[in-house]
Amino acid sequence: MQNNKKTFTFVRKCCLKCDFVMQKYVIILFALLISAVVFAENAETDVSMAKITLNTGDVFIGEIIVENEHILMIRTAEGSRFQFPINDIETIQENYAVRRIVVVEQRSAAPPREEVQRPIVERANPIYERSPVQQAVLHASRVRTQGLTFEYSVGYGTFLLRDIHQLQYNIWLQNSWGVRFRIVDDFPAHITHSFALGYMLKQHNFGVNFSYLTTGGRLHRADFSGSYTIDMIMNGYRLGTFYRYYFGNPAIQFYLQLSSGAMFSTLRMEERLQIHFESAEEISTLRGVGIFAEPTIGVSFQITENLRFSLSGGCQLDFLGRLSLYGERTIINARWSGLRLYGSLMFILPERLFLNR
């Protein structure tokens, strides 16, 4: 009997010990299960989005919800919507993996607080969600980066014309003893006009241009008996190509330009003599063709999305340009080398407009 009692006591102790061990393992297992559930709810997930890169270098990531031939609209992971013109987009990278952490909110046992329902107004254009300063900057950065360009420039130039100056001086010197000419005009600097037709592709602008240059000289003598005048009118017609590279902020851009081509020159000499009621006139025209090169640096300001104003300066360098009189070559060269200053107005016709037409 005593042995049975000892055996029962031993078994009871073993059962209590096993029960304590089992409770310990059950608690540990339950804690691991809770941790796994919480980790699963707060796990990192990869979300497939689209990566939009604009011509200005800005990058936006979101889900494409609207896409057509004119606009593209995305919705970001935070719920914001952005709309872009197709011409302002450089690349679209789809299936762009974005890693985000989804956190499950802790629910409180307290009854939910009553909230006031407010009407939600969805704005069609997300640009209005920005501050006025951001709107102005964003609007200024929307630049037409592809299309036809039409440009008119009015400028001011100085002209070397060394041989033409020498010709006028020789005429004055040869007649100074008999007629006593006075040099009235000596081929001064004058206004120039230029037209350019080009194509713009991002930072590059290239095409053809035409310029008109003019200046002149005059020798004159007059007294009570009559007058003697020699006018030397110099005209230049410049036809060539140009390449321009822009850099800097789209609203205010600096650029480098190189132009080159052919320079067509004419020298019209009008000699008029009048003595009392008698008069005589003789006209001679010299013509020649040379080549030119003109490096230029300038700054361009955006007025609207399709209109820009620029200021620039450069130096024209002329080569060759030998003049001929009645088909015979002379020793006189017409070289218009000199300083050039320009004020220009450029209109940009977007490519999608003239392609649709």
Image (tube, rainbow, N blue to C red):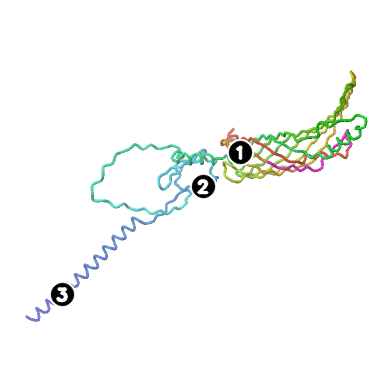
Determine which of the numbered discs, if any, sits on residue 58 in the image.
2
Position of 131 relative to 229 (above/below): below
Q: Position of residue 90 (x, y in %)?
A: 55, 45
Residue 318 magenta-drawn? yes
Q: Name the foreground residue: 267 vs 39.
A: 267
At a point 91% along the width and 29% down the height, the residue shown is 179
Q: CA distance from mark 1 to mark 2?
A: 21 Å
The mark nearer the N terminus, 1 or 2, is 2
Residue 255 magenta-drawn? no
Determine the image quadrant of residue 21: bottom left
Q: Which element carries disc 3, helix, strand or loop?
A: helix
At a point 86% along the width and 36% down the height, the residue shown is 169
The residue wearing badge 1 is: 147
Q: Which element carries disc 2, helix, strand or loop?
A: loop
Please report the bounds of the magenta region as a residue range.
313-328
**Amino acid at the residue labelled 3:** Lys
Question: Crowdedness of circle 1 by 10 Å Cα count: few (<14), some, many (20+)?
Answer: many
The mark nearer the N terminus, 1 or 3, is 3
Q: Position of residue 73 (x, y in %)?
A: 46, 41
Q: Name the foreground residue: 1 vs 268.
A: 268
Question: Crowdedness of circle 2 by 10 Å Cα count: few (<14), some, many (20+)?
Answer: few
